[in-house]
């Protein structure tokens, strides 16, 4: 068995552990524990030289000490929990980690839940540090690896508790690297090459519950005004909400970075985004993916009413998922929704089962400065350019959530990037059916982390 096949086989073994995110209130999970044990037994050379701290089933971290550290440490993050699957809709059993030849890409490909989110980066990191430790490599600064087991449910039992423990020990980082974006191959049609998108800011997150109460009863005797109709009108008003578009630093950097890699006219506009902002945001307003980078968004998601078709519900509820643009606040968005609803019969309040997270903006020390001066940007950019030749590296706004938000108090710079090159079709498999990664992509991730660690 070759060294390469050993790396891939360990990756497959990690994917075969069904680390589905446990429900709220669960304090222990055998699969999460099995995954932790897998790491400790599969990477013995690294575990000999690194300090290992297991918080509980939901979190562990490693500290690889430098001989004479003169710089602040760097933190690498990933999570080992995965979202549920509809197994019958997959081409292969979702935890089999089946390797199959993909005719569309012409590559051997691993199919499994977690191949992209985010066991690929976690195992890629572990393979890199194991190989370096085996060679006797010693980092020039302390390196931390922190892995959580409930990122898909807010990270409150994993990343948040790890961050609190590290903070209580007085540990601070120069910068943090987590998931968030990738080398996007074809996602931006106007771009002439794949783009290395590194998210430097992150939207906030909250869920609002809109509810209307009424007297329950038989559907044969409906009231003149029904709760569901009242709620429906309120939700329709919320659906029309268009928050004021703004150009924030990460998106400004994205446009400027993209400008040299599109046609001349588009590039001219993007090279001076503040000057041409009215033109840019109107031109891109119809693209939901781009428009989400300009404003706070509100999405209508779940609806709840009666448990039977012939029963009037005592309450109807609708959930509005809000993604808060840096510069806005959760409280301000809540009040904006309340003003928009403008109906005392409709209660609008935070969802009790979810965290309310403010946006993660650029650290105040770097607002108004060049993105290139963020701690970690230069070594990360250099490594991306080395491992993905010809790929420009561009700042980006992460419109989803990552565990890294729990570490915002511990570092002045959080960078969000996974070293894989993905097409739009491959990106769509994240949280979807047939999630997969090419063997080449996985091995590239190992090489990326190895080179980055060597340069730190």
Image: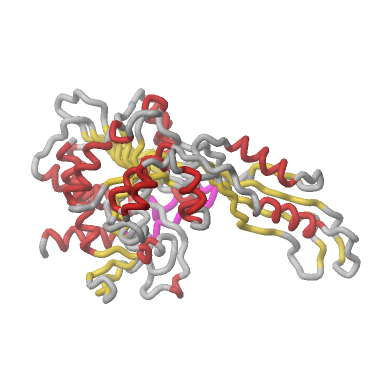
Q: Is residue 410 rendered to the left or right of residue 439? A: right
Q: Residue at x 54, y 42 (%)?
A: 324
Q: Position of residue 158 (x, y in %)?
A: 43, 42
Residue toward you, 368 or 142: 368
Q: Is residue 347 rendered to the left or right of residue 377? A: right
Establish if 436 lies above or below 227: below
> How many discs appear?
0
Q: Position of residue 1 (x, y in %)?
A: 11, 65
Q: Position of residue 40 (x, y in %)?
A: 26, 47
Q: Is residue 56 visible?
A: no
Q: Looking at the image, which residue sits at the far front?
A: 265
Q: Looking at the image, which residue sits at the far left?
A: 135
Establish if 218 lies above or below 363: below
Query: Does the magenta segment cover residue 29?
Result: yes
Question: What stretch of residues is rendered in magenta?
Answer: 15-32
Q: Residue at x 39, y 60 (%)?
A: 18
Q: Residue at x 29, y 70 (%)?
A: 98
Query: Does the magenta segment cover residue 435?
Result: no
Q: Position of residue 308 (x, y in %)?
A: 76, 68
Q: Is residue 213 rendered to the left or right of residue 140? A: right
Residue toward you, 48 or 422: 422
Residue 206 is drawn in which quadrant?
top right
Prevalent SS, magenta region:
loop
What colour scheme has been applied to the protein in the rendered image?
A: secondary structure
Residue toward you, 327 or 181: 327
Establish if 86 lies above or below 205: below
Q: Is residue 244 visible?
A: yes
Q: Residue at x 33, y 60 (%)?
A: 115
* Quadrant of the rendering where the C terminus is positioned: top left
């Amino acid at each position: 068995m070759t060294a390469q096949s050993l790396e891939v086989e360990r990756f497959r073994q990690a994917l075969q552990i069904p680390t589905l995110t446990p429900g709220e209130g669960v304090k222990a999970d055998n699969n999460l524990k099995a995954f932790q044990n897998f790491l400790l037994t599969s990477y013995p050379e690294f575990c000999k030289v690194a300090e290992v701290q297991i918080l509980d089933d939901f979190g562990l971290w490693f500290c690889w000490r430098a001989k004479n550290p003169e710089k602040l440490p760097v933190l690498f993050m990933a999570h080992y929990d995965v979202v549920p699957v509809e197994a019958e809709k997959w081409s292969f059993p979702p935890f089999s980690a089946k390797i199959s030849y993909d005719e569309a890409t012409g590559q051997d490909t691993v199919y499994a839940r977690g191949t992209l989110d985010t066991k690929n980066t976690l195992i890629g990191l572990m393979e890199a540090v194991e190989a370096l430790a085996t060679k006797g490599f010693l980092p020039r600064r302390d390196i931390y690896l922190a892995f959580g087991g409930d990122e898909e449910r807010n990270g409150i039992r994993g990343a948040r508790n790890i961050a609190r423990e590290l903070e209580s020990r007085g540990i601070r980082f120069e910068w943090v690297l987590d998931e968030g974006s990738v080398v996007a191959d074809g996602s931006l049609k106007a771009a002439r090459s794949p783009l290395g998108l590194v998210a430097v800011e992150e939207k906030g997150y909250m869920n609002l519950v809109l509810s209307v109460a009424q007297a329950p009863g038989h559907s044969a005797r409906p009231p003149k005004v029904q709760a569901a109709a009242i709620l429906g009108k309120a939700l329709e008003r919320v659906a029309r909400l268009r928050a004021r578009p703004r150009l924030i630093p990460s998106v400004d950097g994205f446009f400027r970075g993209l400008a040299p890699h599109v046609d001349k006219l588009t590039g001219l506009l993007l090279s001076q985004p503040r000057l041409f902002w009215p033109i840019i945001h109107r031109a891109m307003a119809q693209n939901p993916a781009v428009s989400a980078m300009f404003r706070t968004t509100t999405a209508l998601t779940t609806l709840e009413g009666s448990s039977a078709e012939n029963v009037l519900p005592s309450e109807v509820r609708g959930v509005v998922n809000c993604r808060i643009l840096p510069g806005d606040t959760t409280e301000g968005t809540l009040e904006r929704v309340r003003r928009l609803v403008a109906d005392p019969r409709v209660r609008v309040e935070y969802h009790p089962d979810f965290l309310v997270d403010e946006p993660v903006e650029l650290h105040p020390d770097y607002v108004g400065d060049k993105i290139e001066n963020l701690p970690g940007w230069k070594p990360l950019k250099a490594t991306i350019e080395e491992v993905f030749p010809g790929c420009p590296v561009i700042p980006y706004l992460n419109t989803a959530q990552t565990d890294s938000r729990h570490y915002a108090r511990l570092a002045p710079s959080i960078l969000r990037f996974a070293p894989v090159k993905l097409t739009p079709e491959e990106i769509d498999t994240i949280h979807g059916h047939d999630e997969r990664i090419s063997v080449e992509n996985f091995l590239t991730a190992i090489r990326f982390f190895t080179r980055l660690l060597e340069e730190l």
